[in-house]
Image (cartoon, helix red, strand yellow):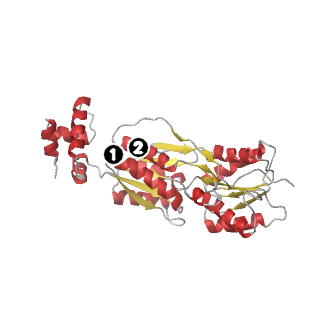
């Protein structure tokens, strides 16, 4: 097994220099760093995590605090974090913050202390809980966040413009001739749901339209079925429904099929998230794509930079886009 001594001997430097290169110390000049890194790659040397921890006083663990039941979001989120973390020699520890009851701030602090993470990635809805960012800062744990709205207290926040994306959904439906448009919104206590609703309403208002109907779900499939059943039971049913996430949009498609409605002939459906589910449905779902894995990787890289004493304050952002599938089409006349 290759050792750090082997790397030092091949590179013609001291073991301490190799250690400094591995731990990204600024005390090594660029030429020496490149020389050592080339030898590390050639020998396929992987430093001991325990040795790195002893040398730096760090655990090389990152924490993820979340309260999201949607595996279609959690999967790309965790892949994005793990990819960025592994590239820098860090591992990920995941902690679901228990919904309802208890003290979520104390829960996050207990996890951070118990797991001895070097930093935290906090995602909605946990990132928006008052006091979480300040509490982590108080115990010296750097934290970054994803959010649909601006947040304070974090070392970096990537804010996705979900309001603007929802407004673009309204523009798309109106351009297709739809006027009886319904919204299947997310839970009213979720900032993301409020942003998507506000953007959609603003988009309709810009065309002198208001919602024909509205029902609220909890981002889950069962709530989507119940809400879609109410929306489609109306004598003057909508010609288009915007669902606040892909899972609830899938529920709309199921209810529509059960009522013998053709999609998109009788009903156009648009979701939000751009998850893999959108491509698995028939017809393929028109949806707002959030590049969740890329977003997660960006904030993780910024977090590691902060942990290692670097980084910058360049604002982080993500481009959301409308992916047009077969579930949305022109309104049927007559």
**Residue displayed at 58% across by 46% down:** 149
Residue 140 visible, this orientation? no
In percent of width and height, residue 100 lies at 55, 65
In percent of width and height, residue 117 lies at 35, 54
Instruction: Using the rendered view, name the quadrant where residue 95 is placed.
Output: bottom left
**Residue displayed at 30% across by 52% down:** 59
Q: Is residue 256 left or right of residue 124?
A: right
Which mark sits nearer the N-terminus, 2 or 1? 1
Residue 301: numbered disc: 2
- Vertical order, 161 against 269 (above or below): above
Instruction: Using a 10 Å C-alpha cutoff, classify the residue at mark 2 as few (fewer than 14 neighbours), some (14 to 19) or many (20 or more).
Output: some
In percent of width and height, residue 77 lies at 47, 53
Front-most of residues 109 and 269: 269
Q: Tag 2's secondary structure?
A: helix
Q: Is residue 125 left or right of residue 297?
A: right
Residue 88: numbered disc: 1
Q: Is residue 212 left or right of residue 105?
A: right
Instruction: Using a 10 Å C-alpha cutoff, classify the residue at mark 1 as few (fewer than 14 neighbours), some (14 to 19) or many (20 or more).
Output: some
- Vertical order, 13 against 274 (above or below): above
């Amino acid at each position: 097994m290759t050792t750090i001594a082997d790397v030092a001997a091949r590179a013609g430097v001291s073991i301490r220099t190799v250690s400094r290169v591995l731990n990204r110390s600024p005390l090594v000049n660029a030429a020496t760093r490149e020389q050592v890194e080339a030898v590390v790659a050639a020998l396929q040397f992987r430093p001991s995590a325990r040795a790195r921890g002893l040398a730096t006083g760090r655990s090389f663990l990152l924490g993820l605090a979340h309260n999201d039941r949607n595996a279609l979001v959690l999967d790309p989120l965790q892949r994005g974090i793990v990819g960025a973390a592994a590239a820098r020699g860090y591992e990920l520890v995941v902690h679901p913050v228990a919904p309802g009851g208890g003290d979520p701030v104390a829960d996050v602090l207990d996890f951070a202390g118990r797991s001895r993470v070097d930093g935290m990635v906090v995602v909605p809805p946990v990132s928006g809980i008052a006091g979480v960012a300040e509490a982590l800062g108080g115990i010296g744990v750097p934290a970054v966040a994803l959010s649909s709205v601006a947040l304070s207290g974090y070392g970096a926040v990537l804010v996705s413009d979900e309001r603007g994306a929802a407004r673009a959904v309204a523009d798309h439906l109106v351009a297709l001739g739809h006027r009886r448009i319904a919204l299947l919104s997310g839970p009213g206590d979720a900032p993301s749901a409020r942003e998507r609703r506000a953007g959609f309403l603003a988009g309709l208002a810009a065309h002198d339209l208001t919602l024909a109907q509205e029902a609220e779900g909890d981002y889950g499939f069962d709530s989507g079925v119940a809400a879609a059943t109410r929306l489609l039971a109306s004598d003057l049913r909508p010609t288009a429904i915007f669902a606040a996430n892909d899972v609830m949009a899938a529920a709309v498609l199921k209810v529509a099929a059960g009522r013998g409605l053709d999609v998109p002939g009788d009903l156009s459906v648009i979701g939000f998230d751009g998850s893999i589910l959108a491509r698995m449905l028939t017809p393929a779902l028109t949806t707002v794509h959030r590049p969740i894995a890329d977003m997660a990787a960006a904030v993780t890289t910024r977090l590691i930079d902060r942990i290692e004493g670097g980084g910058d304050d360049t604002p982080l952002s993500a481009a959301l886009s409308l992916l047009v599938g077969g579930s949305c089409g022109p309104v049927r006349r007559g």
